[in-house]
């Protein structure tokens, strides 16, 4: 009897974990984006240019790493920032950025949606 209960509980636990894993929206692990004007992200100013963007999961935290792609690697800027994944109703048809202007008239990046992803990336406060 105890063995049957243990097996049943184990199966329920596996089913629960798998249902959460299936609910995670699909996103590409690596993307490229070009900013045509400087952007403030996590308190760091990213000059206009092309960046590779990698996605990492640190437990439940989603981290995006921006690396300046069009300059010498020794001088390239790297910014790590937390973001929230917000599921979309369908795959994104195009890449879009949204930003707000702060009191210094700087463009502060607030979210990115990459073409083909099933979620948009909404940024939190400061860089890591």
Image (cartoon, rainbow, N blue to C red):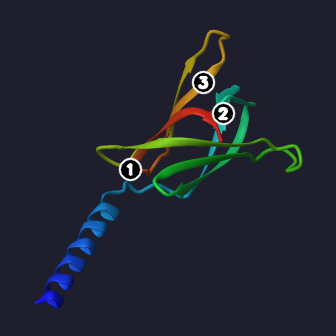
Tell me the crowding category of disc 2: few under 14, some 14 to 19, or many 20 or more residues within 10 angstroms, Cα based.
few
* In this rendering, position of residue 120 left or right of residue 50: left
Q: The N terminus lies in which quarter of the figure?
A: bottom left
Of the image marks 2 and 3, the number of the one nearer the N terminus: 2
Q: Which mark is residue 35?
A: 2
Of the image marks 2 and 1, the number of the one nearer the N terminus: 2
Counting from the top left corner in percent of width and height, residue 58 is at 54, 56
Counting from the top left corner in percent of width and height, residue 112 is at 51, 37
Q: Which mark is residue 108?
A: 3
Residue toward you, 8 or 39: 8
Residue 93 visible in the picture: no
In 3D space, how far apart are the residues under numbered discs 2 and 3 (Cα atoms)? Answer: 12 Å
From this viewpoint, which residue is outermost toward the left?
1
Q: Are marks 2 and 1 in contact (CB under 8 Å)?
A: no
Q: The C terminus lies in which quarter of the figure?
A: top right
Label 3 secondary element: strand
Of the image marks 1 and 3, the number of the one nearer the N terminus: 3
Q: Which residue is mark 1?
A: 118
> Residue 78 falls in which quadrant of the image?
top right
Residue 65 against residue 6 in the figure, above or below: above
Residue 108 against residue 60 in the figure, above or below: above
At x 31% / y 47%, what residue is drawn?
90
Q: Nearer the viewer, mark 1 or mark 3?
A: 3
Residue 108 against residue 82 in the figure, above or below: above
């Amino acid at each position: 009897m105890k063995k049957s209960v243990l097996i049943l509980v184990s199966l329920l636990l596996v089913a629960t974990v798998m249902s959460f894993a299936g609910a995670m929206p699909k996103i590409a692990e690596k993307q490229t984006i070009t900013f045509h004007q400087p952007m403030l992200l996590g308190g760091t100013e990213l000059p206009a240019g092309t960046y590779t963007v990698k996605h990492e999961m640190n437990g439940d935290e989603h981290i995006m790493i921006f690396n300046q792609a069009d300059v010498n690697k020794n001088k390239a800027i790297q910014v790590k920032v937390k973001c929230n994944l917000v599921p979309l109703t369908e795959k994104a048809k195009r890449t879009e950025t949204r930003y707000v202007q702060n009191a210094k008239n700087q463009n502060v990046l607030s979210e990115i949606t990459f073409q083909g992803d099933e979620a948009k990336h909404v940024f939190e406060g400061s860089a890591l």
